Amino acid sequence: MATTIDGATIDEATIARDANRRIRRSNNFAGWAFAGPSVFIVLGLSFIPMIWAGYLSLTDSNLVSAGHFIGLANYAALAKDPLLRQAFTNTFLLAVMYLPIGLAAGLGVAILLNQKIKLIGFYRTCFLVPFVASAAAEGLLFGFIFDPNFGIVNAGLQAVGLPRQGFLQDPSQALAVLAIVYFWTQFGFNIVIYLAALQDIPQEVLEAAKIDGAGRWSRFWHVTVPTVRPVTIFLLVWGLIDVFQFFDLVYTTTRGGPLNSTLTLVYYIWELAFNFFTAGYGAAVAYVLFFTSLIVTVAALAYGRRRRVTL
Amino acid sequence: MTGEQTLQGVPEVDMALHRARIEEAERRMHRSGWRRHLPQRGHLVLLPLSIIMVLPFVWMLLTSFMTDTEINSIPPSLWPHHLYTGGYSTVLASSDFPYWFLNSLIVAGAAVLAQLVLCSLAGYAFARIQFRGSSVMLILLLATALIPFQLTVIPTFVIFHDIGLINTLGALIVPQLTSALGIYLMYSFFQSFPRELEEAGRIDGCSRLQVFWKVVLPLAKPALAALGIITFIYAWNDLFWPLIAITSSRTFTVQVGLTTFQGEHITHWSQIMAGTTLTTLPVLLVFLFGQRRFIQAITGAVKG
C-alpha cells in the first residue's frame, strides 16, 4: 500500500524494510562493539598460538630462533622417549589414585551436609579453604609438613613408635604423597558441586522412596547416585583435565624427582621448552597432551550421554 | 474430601498399612523428645574432617611465629614459646617480597577491573543483541575451554617476547583482560535478566551503551561480584605463566617469589611459612567475605 506525502509516493513495505535493515545494522554494530574486544583477545590468544604450536612442533626451534622445518621428526622421537612414557604413567597414576576416592568422598560429605545439618556454613568454609589458597603456597607448606627431618608427620610417626618415612624424597612414596595433597586441595570443590546437585533433588522423591520401604543404601544407589550422575561426569572430566595439567604442586615440592617419580606431562613440557630450550620438541609433546585430554574428555562426555539416555 | 473417598475401592487394611508407613517414616525423619537435643550423627564425621582440612594452615600460621631453632628441634614444638616475628621481618626487609606483593596486587586488580568491563559487555552482547556471527563466535569462545594453556604457552611466550612484553607486568595482565569463563558467567546471568527494564530504557531514548551502563550493570552486581572474586583468586594464585614470563626478581609475583625461597632458605622454615602466610592471606580474606558469591559462581558455571 502506498501513501502520498507532499507529492512523494512512499511505499510502507519499503519503510518497514529500511527500518529492519537499520535495526539489523545497528545491532551488528552494537554487538561487535560490545563483544569484539573480548572475542579478539580470547580467540587471538588461543587459536593463533595453537596453530603456531602445531607449526613449531614440526621444527627444531630453540625458543629464541624459529628453527628449521624437520617434518615429523619430533613426533618420531617422542614415541621412543622414556621420560615421556614416565610422565604419562605418573599422570595416569595420579588420576587413578585421586579421582575415584576424590569423587566418592566428595559425594559422601555432600550427603552428610545435605541433611539439614547445623554448622553447614562453617563446614563448607573449612572444606573450601584448601581449594582457594594457591597451589604454590600449599606445595611449600606440604614440603614442610612432610619434610623427612623436621616435618610434623614424621615427628608424629616417631611419637607413636612407627618408622620415619622419606615421603617426597622417597621415589616410591612421592607420587602418592602428591596425590594426597592434591585430594586435599580439590576435596572442597567436589563437595560443593555435589551439594548443589543434591539440593536440586526434590525432597519428595527421597521421601517417596522412604515410604515405599527403600532403605538407606537402596535410596543412595537408586535415587541419589543416578540423579547426580551428570554432575559425576562433569567432575570426572574436570578432574581429568586438571590432573593432565598438574604442575604447581610438582614445581613447589619435588621438581619432578626423585628419580623422575613425580615427573608429570606439563612439568615435562615446561622443562623441555623453558629449561632445555627444545621448544619444537616441547610443542610436539604439548600436542600429544592436547589430543589425549581431548579424546578422554569426549569419551567421558559420550559415555555420560549414553548412560543418561538408557536410564 | 477425605483420603478414603479419593481412594475408593482400595481395601481398608491397605490404607491402614499405608498410613502406618507414613507415620513411621515421619517419626524417623523428625526425631522427637529428648533425642532432638543430641548432636546429629553427621558431625562425628564432619567435625574431624573439617579440622583436618584447615589444620595445615593452622600449622603454617603457628610455625610462622616460631624460631628456626624451635621448628628444627626434635620433636618439634607445637606452639611458639613467644610470638617471634623474625620470620616476617626477614621476609619483608631482606627479600623482594614487598615488590612481589605489590606486583600481584597490580596484576590481580587490573585483571578484575578489565574482566568486569569486558566480560560483562561481551556476555550482554551474546545474551541480548542479535548480531551477525554471534552464535558462531560464542561457540568458538566456549571451544577455547578445551585448549589447554600448556599447548599455547610456547608461542605465546614467543609473541610476547617479540613485542617486548616479557619481563613486564603487562605480560601477566594481557592474557587476563578477559576470559571465556567470565564471558560465559555473564552471558548466563544476562539470559535470565528481565527484558522489560532495558526496553523501558530504550523507549526513554537511551543508547544501548547508556542502557547497559545505567540500567543493566547496577542490577548485575551479584554476578559482577562473583566474577570479580573468582578472577581475583585465579589471578593471584597463578604460577605457571608468571614463572615463564618474568625473569627478574623485582617483577615477580608473590607465587613466583615464594618458589625462590625453596633453594635459598631451605632450612629457614620460619621465613618460608611467614611468606606463605602473607601470600595466602589476601586470597583467604576475599574468599571469606565473598564466599556466597564464590560458591554461586562455581556451582552456577557447572549447572549452566
Image: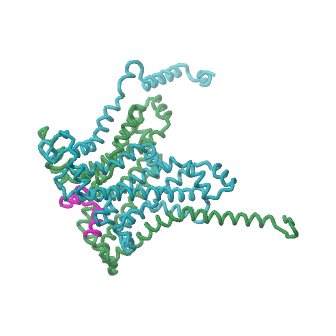
Chain colours: A green, B cyan
Q: Is residue B65 depicted above or below A93 in this figure? A: above
Left or right of residue A304: residue B252: left
* Quarter that holds the N terminus of chain B: top right
Q: Residue at x 46, y 68 (%)?
A: A44
Q: Is residue B258 depicted above or below A115 in this figure? A: below
Q: Is residue B206 depicted above or below A22 in this figure? A: above
Total tally of numbered discs in the picture: 0
Question: Is A254 part of what is drawn in magenta?
Answer: yes
The region drawn magenta spans: A252-275
Point out residue B70 in the picture as x, y percentages from the top left corner: 15, 44
Q: Nearer the viewer, residue A247 or B208?
A: B208
Point out residue B110 in the picture as x, y percentages from the top left corner: 43, 58
Q: Visible in this render: residue B221?
A: yes
Point out residue A28 in the picture as x, y percentages from the top left corner: 62, 65
Question: Is A300 part of what is drawn in magenta?
Answer: no
Q: Is residue B35 depicted above or below A92 in this figure? A: above
